[in-house]
């Protein structure tokens, strides 16, 4: 089963199948394959069937919205009213929010059907989904390998056809990297394009929600539903949301695409580089004007990112203290004991590491050397992009330095794990939009190619990806075991 | 401690005042700010620091802060930044307080105080910044456990930080009162100290007279009245002098004022102090304030105490002293102006005397605030009008005032029911005088023999006969005439 959202919409509209039928099909696939893949933390079967029934009524009444009746899954950091939101952490294993995240609300309003909540690295901290309290997710292309992270559950669910689409969040690559590793299409919108309200924060100045799907055209539909100003998020943008689907069919003749030389240098797997080159040739054939550019401060992005993201995280995660919600240790003897044990038991190792590093970076006497310096570097990285966009419309590069790696192969080496994000994180530091799309395979594992655009130019990203997908079928490949 | 010893030392005091802003909703959420509700009924998901929720700035709180800044002629930058102050405490839901650090909304300003009659001092204000209040921990409700009430969490506060410009507890109190008066004039804070809407922390240090370096300071918290502020500071000054005179050293620490025991005691030392790890809050954009915003707020500023005082002197002919007293407290000024609006414009001085004299005395004795006065401004204006038009004498007026205080109605009703109308009918007064003269031949002789003082005796007798109602002026004139 490899239907796209576009196909589901068409089928529902034509009465070929009902939302209830297709929802049941997906629930059955989840029941069959989730034990092997571990994509879902919660499957909301009863709720999904209720929503599907309501969607069928809406469809029958001719009142269908953009995604009425389309099943989707939400990353388990989007709060869902009445349904557990764990953020992949033991500390929130018992947490049921009394409110929906704005993104969840948007999908509810348009009539989408929620199948469940997907697995993720704890608090979105990780690049392999190995940091989940609920266990690692398996890559559908090779179940001994990681799906990427932190939105590993969402990416794997879409790749394996357990959901036609899913939401994710991207703080340093958490949509694009797992999309690349699982062979699906994912977009990280401009910071401020999608409301962060109800999306549990990791690094507030970097976090941005976005969709995973099987094609750019599907991503356009999903982003349409998610994007827009939200008065509950002060950092959300009031800029009008364009019709993303309307411009997909426009050609890319004359489109100037820059290849940052720093992204094709040492550290990139040469087999992967070759796959990307082929895709570049394809774009050239479509009329794109490909040129080399430079983003000289790329090398600074990892240290800059980790200081800022961890500093913000150390503060964002203070609210998980065992006082009002979430895990509380048994029989605390006093307040300090309550804090220490609740947090000590509730958080996993990587989360603790990042809280400690972030706390250090903000401490008196270190603030100027770390946090302030990182903010200055962030500005330089942003300026690099602005300079680049003076001469090109899009920037193109690999999404990851290598394809999916074996589960457990990097867990003892956090720095090597952090390096997985080398091509993705500068985008978050700049707040720019980017997407990853499948362009081939190495060793039977998908390769992702990344496109960056200028602020609020998601239209151009989606259009270019769509044009590429019109002349390729990498995005439609399905892993054999799940076809 | 001997005065001699005290004289060798100088105390240096700075105040941090937290004024709760009178917005209807919280600074970062839509929850109401009303005081006294059932615990945790006025806290929404944002106030509770639930996962994923985000703060949204209440622009009214910003406008109120700017109103304060404009009133003290402070520097107001075009950009102001909210920062997180990180520390763990059960009544601090997010594990950080949203406050301001590097770019406060109100910069350097100043205010003049009058610590004693005829004395004026300029006190610098370092800054004033916006922040959210924390909730309350309740330790006496559940056995063995603490409760948390988050109703107050997220209530907007303006923290007003003074320069270390005060040199005595008295000056500190004068400054605190001045700020208290100002925020109430500006209608940005209700000033209720019992309910914690206006709280003072005092930074106190001492140094030898003539020394211009600052000594190590102690911060005194938990002061909820002006009286306690004065006592707490004086205690702390004495404690520090004693300590240093005995060869000790003042350590930087936070001390708590215990009003029941009337002492300060150590709460935490500098070593135990939190490293707050301030950094700009990424959930909130910098606040931008345009010159037009400031101009608009300035134009809408109400009349401030200093301007009001000058107007009372220039336009209403009040004395400097009375004008100062009437304007020191906004409620008093409001009362005065309401009464003044009711009556004859010539009555300003009379009204001022009544308000600052009998009314203030009665309110004070009954422990009431001006706004709770049983005598309304129109009632007082009515009383003063009856004095002015000679319906009653000043002396009878005191009786009428007391009756009004007791709730017997307005001045006219009381004068009527009690028959207190002044006798101004000359023939009636003459009759009374004739009777008194006839009854006291001896005193008549004395007067005629040149003993002028006896006139007072006759006036007293006539007034007594009239039960105070005869017009004293007329009595005087007619008496002199008849006694010739």
Image (cartoon, coloured by chain):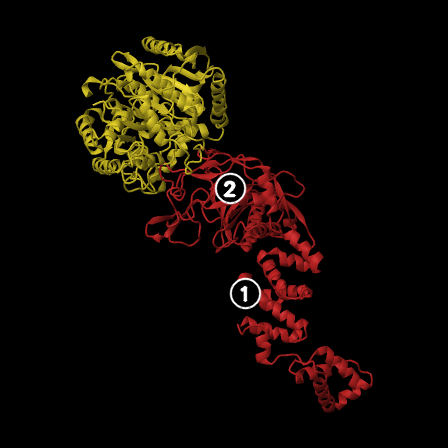
Chain colours: A yellow, B red
Name the one closer to the observer, A232 or B350: A232
Image position, residue B270 (x, y; %): 49, 38
Question: Residues under labels 1 and 2: Cα distance?
Answer: 34 Å
Question: Residue drawn at (62%, 62%), measured in percent from left and top?
Answer: B341
Chain for mark 2?
B
Tell me the tag on residue B130: 2
Decide: is A388 above or below B201: above
Can residue B262 be seen by looking at this rendering?
yes
Image position, residue A382 (x, y; %): 47, 21
Image position, residue A136 (x, y; %): 25, 25
Secondary structure beneath dot 1 equals loop
Chain for mark 1?
B
Q: Quadrant of residue B434?
A: bottom right
Q: Earlier in the sequence, mark 1 or mark 2?
A: 2
Name the one closer to the observer, B373 or A45: A45
Tell me the tag on residue B373: 1
Name the one closer to the observer, B224 or B62: B62
- Is residue B465 shown left or right of residue B262? right
Q: Quadrant of residue B66?
A: top right
């Amino acid at each position: 089963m490899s239907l796209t959202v576009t196909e589901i919409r068409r089928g529902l509209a034509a009465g070929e199948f009902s939302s209830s039928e297709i929802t049941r099909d997906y629930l059955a696939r989840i029941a069959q394959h989730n034990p092997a893949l571990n994509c879902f933390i919660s499957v909301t079967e009863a709720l999904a069937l209720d929503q599907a029934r309501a969607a069928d009524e809406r469809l029958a009444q001719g009142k269908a919205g953009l995604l009425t009746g389309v099943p989707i899954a939400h990353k388990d950091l989007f709060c869902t009213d009445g349904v557990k939101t764990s953020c992949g952490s033991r500390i929130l294993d018992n947490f049921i929010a009394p409110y929906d995240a704005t993104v969840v609300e948007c999908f509810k309003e348009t009539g989408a059907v929620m199948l469940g909540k997907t697995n993720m690295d704890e608090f979105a901290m990780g690049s392999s989904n190995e940091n989940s309290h609920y266990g690692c997710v398996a890559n559908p292309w090779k179940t001994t390998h990681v799906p990427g992270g932190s939105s590993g559950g969402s990416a794997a669910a879409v790749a394996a056809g357990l959901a036609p689409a899913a939401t994710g969040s991207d703080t340093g690559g958490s949509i694009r990297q797992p999309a690349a590793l699982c062979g699906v299409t994912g977009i990280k919108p401009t910071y401020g394009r999608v409301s962060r309200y109800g999306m549990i924060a990791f690094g507030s100045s970097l976090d941005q929600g976005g969709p995973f799907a099987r094609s750019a055209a599907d991503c356009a539909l999903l982003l349409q539903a998610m994007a827009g100003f939200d008065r509950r998020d002060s950092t959300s943008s009031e800029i009008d949301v364009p019709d993303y689907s309307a411009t997909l069919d426009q050609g890319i003749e004359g489109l100037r695409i820059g290849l940052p030389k720093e992204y094709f240098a040492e550290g990139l797997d040469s087999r992967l580089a070759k796959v990307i080159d082929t895709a570049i040739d394809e774009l050239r054939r479509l009329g794109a004007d490909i040129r080399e550019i430079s983003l000289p401060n790329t090398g600074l992005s990892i240290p800059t990112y980790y200081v800022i993201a961890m500093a913000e995280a150390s503060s964002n995660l203070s609210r998980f203290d065992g006082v009002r919600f979430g895990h509380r240790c048994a029989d605390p003897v006093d307040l300090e004991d309550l804090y220490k044990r609740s947090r000590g038991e509730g958080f996993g190792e990587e989360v603790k590491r990042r809280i400690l590093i972030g706390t250090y970076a903000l401490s008196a006497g270190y603030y100027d050397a770390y946090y302030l310096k990182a903010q200055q570097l962030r500005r330089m990285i942003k300026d690099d992009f602005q300079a680049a966009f003076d001469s090109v419309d899009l920037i193109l590069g690999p999404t990851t330095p290598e394809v999916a790696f074996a589960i457990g192969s990097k867990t003892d080496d956090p720095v090597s794990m952090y390096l997985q994000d080398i091509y993705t994180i500068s985008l978050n530091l700049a707040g720019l939009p980017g997407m990853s799309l499948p362009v081939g395979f190495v060793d039977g594992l998908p390769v992702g190619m990344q496109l960056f655009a200028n602020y609020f130019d998601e239209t151009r990203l989606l259009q270019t990806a769509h044009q590429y997908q019109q002349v390729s079928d990498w995005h439609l490949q399905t892993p054999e075991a799940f076809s | 401690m001997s005065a001699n010893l005290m004289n060798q030392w100088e105390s240096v005091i700075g105040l941090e005042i937290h004024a709760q802003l009178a917005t209807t909703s919280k600074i970062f959420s839509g929850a109401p700010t009303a005081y006294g509700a059932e615990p945790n009924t006025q806290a929404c998901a944002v106030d509770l620091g639930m996962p994923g929720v985000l703060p949204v700035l209440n622009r009214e709180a910003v406008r109120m802060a700017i109103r304060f800044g404009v009133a003290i002629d402070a520097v107001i930058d075009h950009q102001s930044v909210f920062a997180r102050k990180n520390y763990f405490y059960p009544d601090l839901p997010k594990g950080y307080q949203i406050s301001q650090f590097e770019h406060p909304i109100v910069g350097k300003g100043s205010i003049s105080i009058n610590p004693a009659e005829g004395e004026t001092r300029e006190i610098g204000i370092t800054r004033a910044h916006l922040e959210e209040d924390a909730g309350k921990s309740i330790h006496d409700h559940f056995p063995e456990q603490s409760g948390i009430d988050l109703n107050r969490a997220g209530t907007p506060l303006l923290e007003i930080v003074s320069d270390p410009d005060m040199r005595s507890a008295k000056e500190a109190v004068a400054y605190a009162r001045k700020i208290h008066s100002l925020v109430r004039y500006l209608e940005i804070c209700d000033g209720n100290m019992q309910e914690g809407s206006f709280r003072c922390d005092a930074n106190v240090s001492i140094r030898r007279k003539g020394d211009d370096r600052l000594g190590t300071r102690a911060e005194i918290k938990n002061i909820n009245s002006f009286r306690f502020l004065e006592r707490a500071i004086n205690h702390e000054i004495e404690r520090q002098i004693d300590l240093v005179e005995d060869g000790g050293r003042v350590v930087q620490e936070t001390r708590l004022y215990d009003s029941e025991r009337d002492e300060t005691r150590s709460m935490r030392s500098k070593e135990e102090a939190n490293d707050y790890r301030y950094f700009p809050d990424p959930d909130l954009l910098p606040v931008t304030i345009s010159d037009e915003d400031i101009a608009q707020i300035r134009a809408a500023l109400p009349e401030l105490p200093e301007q009001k005082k000058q107007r009372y002197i220039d336009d209403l002919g009040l004395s400097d002293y009375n004008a100062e007293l009437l304007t020191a407290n906004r409620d008093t000024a409001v009362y005065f102006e309401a009464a003044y609006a009711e009556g004859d414009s010539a009555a300003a001085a009379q009204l001022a005397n009544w308000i600052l004299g009998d009314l203030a005395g009665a309110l004070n004795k009954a422990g009431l605030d001006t706004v709770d006065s049983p005598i309304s401004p129109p009632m007082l204006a009515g009383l003063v009008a009856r004095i002015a038009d000679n319906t009653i004498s000043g002396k009878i007026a005191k009786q009428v005032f007391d009756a009004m205080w007791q709730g017997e109605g307005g001045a006219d009703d009381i004068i009527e029911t009690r028959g207190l109308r002044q006798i101004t009918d000359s023939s009636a007064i003459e009759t009374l005088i004739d009777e008194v003269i006839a009854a006291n031949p001896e005193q008549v002789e004395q007067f005629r023999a040149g003993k002028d003082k006896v006139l007072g005796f006759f006036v007293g007798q006539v007034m007594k006969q009239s039960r105070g109602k005869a017009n004293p002026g007329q009595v005087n004139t007619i008496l002199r005439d008849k006694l010739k």
